[in-house]
Image (tube, grey):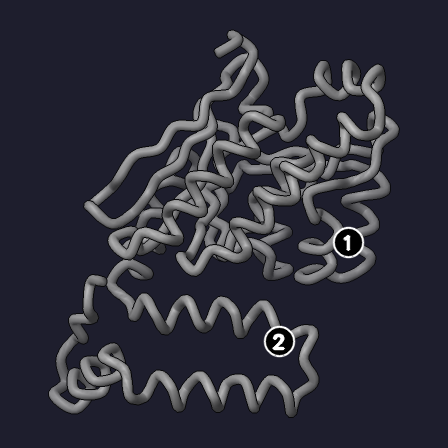
Amino acid sequence: MHENETAVRSEIIDGNIRLVTLDGPRTRNSIGRAQYEALRAIIVDAGNDAAIRAVVLTGAGGFFSSGGNVGALQESRSQNLSEVSRNTDALAAMILAIRNCPTPVIAAVEGGAAGLGVSLALACDMVVASNAARFTVAYVKIGLTPDGGATHFLTDSLPRQLVSELCMLGRPVSAARLHAAGAVNTLCEDGHAIEAALDLARACATGAREAIAVIKTEIASARENQLAEQIDLEGRNINKARYGREAAEGLQAFLEKRKPDFPNR
């Protein structure tokens, strides 16, 4: 690995949580095609592994990710459109892998996220951020436009005026402001983002795995479906779930006034 590249490290926590760490101290965990492909592979594998109940994505060195490497972006100007399109295609595949993963993916943002790092964090199902964290959609500062679904994720969770401020001005926005607006789930003390994210991951890990996977697809379709379509989808899903093993355990546990012990696989 080149000294300026970011390593993508993966480890198992508690036997059922995959902790993924971007580690590139020289560039504050910048990412490019190699990292897109590595992250995609890890996420796809996690989604296909019944033993993994949640994924936590974070950055080393007190920062989540600075997004694209500016030096690499400058070099890409000498490449043809076909070559640079391979990079954006790999980026799209990484983001879509997170959204399509049946396993919950939680971002732990320490310090901040910039550019594509913001897209990567917001692609996750839940976001934990330290009090000092800042989110900067910085593309406009270097004459570029957002990528990685940034405008989609921001518009999906924030008022248009705030999205315009983030994207058109490229100014940092505090985690507290995004938390108040609903784009960040949990604020925590500085240095505790991973710990807080693991708390959420553990809550997911003890939950009903199959039901959570279906809920993720329902949330994804809700903004596109008309009300009648969404009600029909939810009806078909709950009618399938009610005969499953998770419902058998969950309903019985409720009636017996105990915590459910959902199947591990």
> Which residue lies at the image location 44% right of the left edge and 51% below the top edge?
105
* Secondary structure type for disc 1: helix
From the viewer's perspective, tell me whether residue 12 is left or right of residue 22: left
- The quadrant in which residue 141 appears is top right
Q: Is residue 88 above or below residue 102?
A: above
- The quadrant in which residue 20 appears is top left
Q: Is residue 133 above or below residue 7?
A: below
Give the image location of residue 160, x and y in percent. Answer: 80, 59
Q: For the residues carrying marks 2 and 1, which lies nearer the camera in this image?
A: 2
Q: Amino acid at mark 1?
A: Leu
> Which residue lies at the image location 63% right of the left edge and 41% below the top edge?
118
From the viewer's perspective, tell me whether residue 252 is left or right of residue 141: left
For this rendering, which residue is in front, 52 or 164?
52
Q: Quadrant of the C terminus?
A: bottom left
Residue pointed to by mark 2: 222
Residue pointed to by mark 1: 162
Give the image location of residue 108, x and y in percent. Answer: 45, 42
Give the image location of residue 189, x and y in percent. Answer: 41, 41
Which numbered disc covers residue 102? none
Q: Is residue 248 above or below residue 133?
A: below
Q: Is residue 260 above or below residue 115?
A: below
From the viewer's perspective, tell me whether residue 195 is left or right of residue 86: left
* Mark 1 closeness class: few <14, some 14–19, many ≥20 residues within 10 Å: some
For this rendering, which residue is in front, 49 or 185?
49
> Which residue lies at the image location 60% right of the left edge and 44% below the top edge?
93
From the viewer's perspective, tell me whether residue 147 is left or right of residue 256: right
For this rendering, which residue is in front, 181 or 260?
260
Q: How many marks?
A: 2
Q: Do the residues under discs 2 and 1 have CB atoms within 8 angstroms?
A: no
* Secondary structure type for disc 2: helix
